[in-house]
Image (cartoon, rainbow, N blue to C red):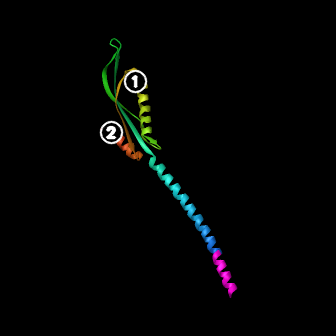
Amino acid sequence: MKRTFFLLILLIAICSCQDNKKLNQIQSENEMLKRQLEEIKTQESSEKFVWIVINYTYGTYYSETDRLGNLKKSIIFSDIREINNYDDSMKYRLEDELEKDLRNRYKGLLHSIQERKTYVFETYKEASEFKFQTLNR
């Protein structure tokens, strides 16, 4: 009887140890999955859709007076771009790229940059709708 009881306790202890190993393994896998899910959420939340608009003035160059005349106001805008890890540094980089394209296009005929605006959206749909409404006022 004592032998049977001892064997029963030994069997329960062995099963319990195996269950603890499985439990520890499941807990470590669960923690790893939680970390991966948090990383995915962080990556998703840092993705933004950006649309840039620059208001500028350009004119006609008159060589006799070495001046620009017949000044006209206009805008240039970027395509909607999906940007990962968007921050202020990225905002200024994108604005500078669009301004550089503008300056290359007009060379000496560009009078001044009046305003640079960057619009940031969570979804492409929001960005597209805003762009459509802005350009079709």
Circle 1 packing at 10 Å, graded few (<14), some (14-19), many (20+), is few
Q: Is residue 12 magenta?
A: yes
**How many tags in the picture?**
2
Which one is in front, 121 or 33?
33
Q: Is residue 56 magenta?
A: no
Residue at x 36%, y 44% (from the top left corner): 129
> Label for residue 132?
none
Relative to 95, 21 lies left or right = right
User: Against 83, is 100 above or below?
Assistant: above
Secondary element under disc 2, as helix, strand or loop, is: helix
Which one is in front, 11 or 86?
11
Dominant secondary structure of the residues highlighted in magenta in the image? helix
**Residue 77 screen position, x and y as percent:** 38, 34
Relative to 124, 5 lies left or right = right
Q: Which residues are magenta?
A: 1-13
Residue at x 54%, y 60% (from the top left corner): 31
Residue holding disc 1:
106
Q: Given this view, does label 1 or label 2 mark the residue nearer the observer? A: 1
Q: Earlier in the sequence, mark 1 or mark 2?
A: 1
User: Against 137, is 6 above or below?
Assistant: below
Image-quadrant location for residue 60: top left
Label 1 – label 2 distance at C-alpha: 24 Å
Relative to 74, 15 lies left or right = right
**Residue 68 screen position, x and y as percent:** 33, 18
Give the residue at the far right of this rendering: 3
Residue holding disc 2:
134
Residue at x 33%, y 16% (from the top left corner): 67
**Residue 42 screen position, x and y as percent:** 47, 51
